[in-house]
């Protein structure tokens, strides 16, 4: 149905108004032949759907009839177009002022001859520098119109979201093409140091070798990144300007939700985020980063760590803020790139008067592409306790491979000691127990009775590791309390040398293992990467130990 305008059409108006009617009825219903039992569906001949993150100024031209429609389509909105007719040659041009795209090459969205005028699948827009952005067009029939009316959805292949607060710049790189600047940059998309709006992005064409490059400001480019791994969350390392450190970003790639499923959303976030839930203000610094001053994190606040020194492990030291004049008393560094829970001893400020220390519970949690370092005051007690029920005093300390231990703790007979590791970054954590000069290394992860420690002729201390809720307890007790007699054969071996291992098998896969799960429909549903996998088997006279360590699982 075509309706002529009542008055003279204004300049740029569509003029004739077209509406498509379609009658729907159920041929199996007997009432259809007695009464006009049907539904009449009215729809526009064409709809333009905006699936871009910005409003769009669209112009639809019916070349066959010489008519034009101009209008603005809001973000996520649908605009009906009544100025065209099905089967005519229809063109579409777009302008996106909010994103800096003012020119468009145009695209054919409806045609009267497929051979001479094929329908385009993309429409190209350009910014002020002439850089092109190819927006995709998705065609579908408007429901209940009998396939005569179309809905054209305009979407971007990729949308880049900068949540880092850093001025990020992007480039694209193809297999047979050089590095090209991404269109639309410099128009409020985070290049000025803020978290700007989303940036629409597309490659020059579809190729499995398409890659993107990222840099901070005018620094060096990152390694090539692929934006086609849906559901992935990884780390992006960019060399810093000083040449001694790197900028660490998190990159998460997810498909859009609902109607936006054709667009892939690439979010750039801070890789390391420190969250202070300890209830007091804390200071944080990165060991080895001498140029940067320590950052103060207020209670309940967060701190994003972007630039870190180049090292095998990412470390962080913590101190209490407001400790008066002088340098603050820093804790031992902890590793922030290992997802785990550790406890950290933090010295209290000197003006506190007691010279003690505070125990923090540190949880490193992976959410998306960011590692959150959550600092909380431990209120449920210390993770370890040493109970000395023997008749002799004991001294304990954390084992170190080189140098002297950081601290030694005296545990008198009949007393207990609450304990947490002095060096939480140690890879193999063991506790050294010393009684009257005799020492023994004990692993607090091996629950059960261990070989007694002989410190004199026919005198020994029994060692047992037990679990008490969430706490590990190391108990020292006289051997006689464990049922050993003076004539026991085990006492004869207590004065001998430490236990010898007869066989040690170590399998290390530094490159890692990749595991892919594929459904019966030949679709990959899971891909896991295990890096720095180590399997160690130890066969000794009194025990057999199997240790499996995975440094990184993604």
Image (cartoon, rainbow, N blue to C red):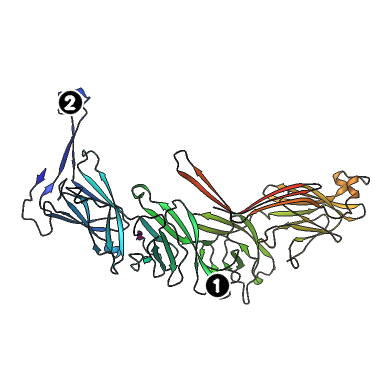
Q: Is residue 193 above or below residue 8?
A: below
Q: Quadrant of residue 181?
A: bottom left
How many discs appear? 2
Q: Are marks 2 and 1 in contact (CB under 8 Å)?
A: no
Q: Residues within 10 Å of mark 2 (few under 14, many from 20)?
A: few
| Side of 7 relative to 383 (left or right) | left
Which SS class for mark 2?
A: helix
Q: Which residue is mark 2?
A: 32
State the image coordinates of residue 400 (x, y, percent, origin top left): 73, 63
Q: Quadrant of the N terminus?
A: top left
Give the residue at x 47% y 53%. Answer: 232
Q: Is residue 508 above or below residue 168?
A: above
The one of 391 and 257 positioned closer to us in this rendering: 257
Give the residue at x 10% y 60%. Answer: 11
Give the residue at x 33% y 55%. Answer: 156
State the image coordinates of residue 241 (x, y, percent, origin top left): 49, 74
Which portion, as a residue range, is magenta? 199-209
């Amino acid at each position: 149905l075509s309706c002529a305008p009542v008055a003279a059409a204004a300049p740029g108006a569509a003029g004739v108004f077209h509406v498509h009617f379609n009658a729907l009825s159920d041929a199996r219903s007997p009432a259809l032949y007695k009464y006009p039992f049907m539904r009449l569906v009215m729809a526009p001949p064409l709809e333009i759907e905006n699936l871009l993150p910005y409003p769009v100024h669209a112009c639809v031209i019916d070349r066959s009839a010489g008519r034009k429609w101009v209008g603005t389509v809001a973000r996520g909105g649908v605009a009906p177009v009544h100025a065209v007719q099905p089967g005519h040659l229809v063109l579409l041009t777009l302008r996106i002022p909010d994103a800096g795209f003012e020119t468009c090459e145009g695209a054919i969205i409806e045609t009267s001859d497929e051979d001479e005028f094929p329908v385009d699948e993309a429409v190209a827009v350009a910014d002020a520098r002439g850089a092109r952005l190819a927006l995709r067009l998705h065609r579908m029939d408007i429901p209940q119109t009998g396939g005569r009316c179309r809905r054209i959805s305009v979407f971007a292949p990729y949308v880049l979201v900068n949540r880092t607060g850093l001025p990020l710049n992007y480039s694209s790189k193809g297999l047979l093409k050089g590095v090209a600047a991404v269109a639309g940059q410099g128009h409020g998309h985070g290049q000025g140091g803020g978290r700007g709006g989303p940036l629409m992005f597309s490659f020059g064409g579809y190729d499995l070798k398409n890659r993107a490059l990222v840099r901070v400001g005018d620094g060096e480019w990152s390694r090539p990144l692929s934006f086609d791994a849906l559901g992935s969350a990884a780390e992006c390392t960019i060399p810093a300007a000083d040449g001694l450190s790197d900028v660490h970003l998190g990159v998460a790639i997810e498909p859009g939700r609902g109607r936006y499923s054709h667009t892939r959303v690439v979010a750039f976030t801070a890789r390391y985020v420190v969250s202070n839930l300890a209830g007091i203000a804390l200071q944080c610094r990165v060991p080895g980063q001498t140029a940067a001053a320590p950052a103060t994190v207020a209670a309940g606040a967060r701190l994003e760590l972007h630039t870190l020194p180049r090292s095998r492990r990412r470390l962080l030291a913590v101190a209490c803020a407001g400790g008066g004049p002088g340098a603050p008393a820093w804790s031992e560094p902890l590793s922030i790139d290992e997802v785990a829970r550790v406890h950290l001893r933090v010295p209290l400020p000197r003006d506190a008067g007691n010279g003690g220390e505070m125990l923090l519970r540190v949880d490193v949690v992976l959410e998306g592409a960011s590692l959150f370092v959550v600092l909380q005051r431990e209120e449920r007690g210390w993770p370890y306790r040493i109970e000395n029920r023997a008749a002799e005093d004991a001294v304990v300390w954390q084992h170190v491979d080189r140098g002297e231990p950081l601290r030694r703790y005296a545990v008198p007979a009949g007393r207990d000691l609450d304990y947490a590791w002095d060096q939480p970054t140690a890879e193999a954590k063991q506790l050294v127990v010393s009684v009257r000069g005799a020492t023994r290394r004990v692993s607090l992860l091996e629950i059960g009775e261990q070989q007694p420690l002989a410190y004199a002729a026919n005198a020994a201390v029994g060692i047992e590791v037990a679990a008490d809720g969430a706490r590990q307890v190391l108990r020292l007790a006289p051997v006689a309390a464990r049922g050993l007699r003076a004539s026991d054969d085990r006492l004869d071996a207590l004065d001998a040398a430490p236990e010898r291992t007869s066989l040690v098998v170590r399998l290390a896969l530094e490159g890692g293992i990749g595991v892919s799960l594929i459904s019966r429909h030949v679709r990959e549903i899971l891909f896991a990467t295990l890096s720095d996998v180590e399997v160690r088997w130890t066969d000794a006279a009194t025990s057999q130990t199997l240790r499996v360590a995975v440094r990184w699982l993604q």
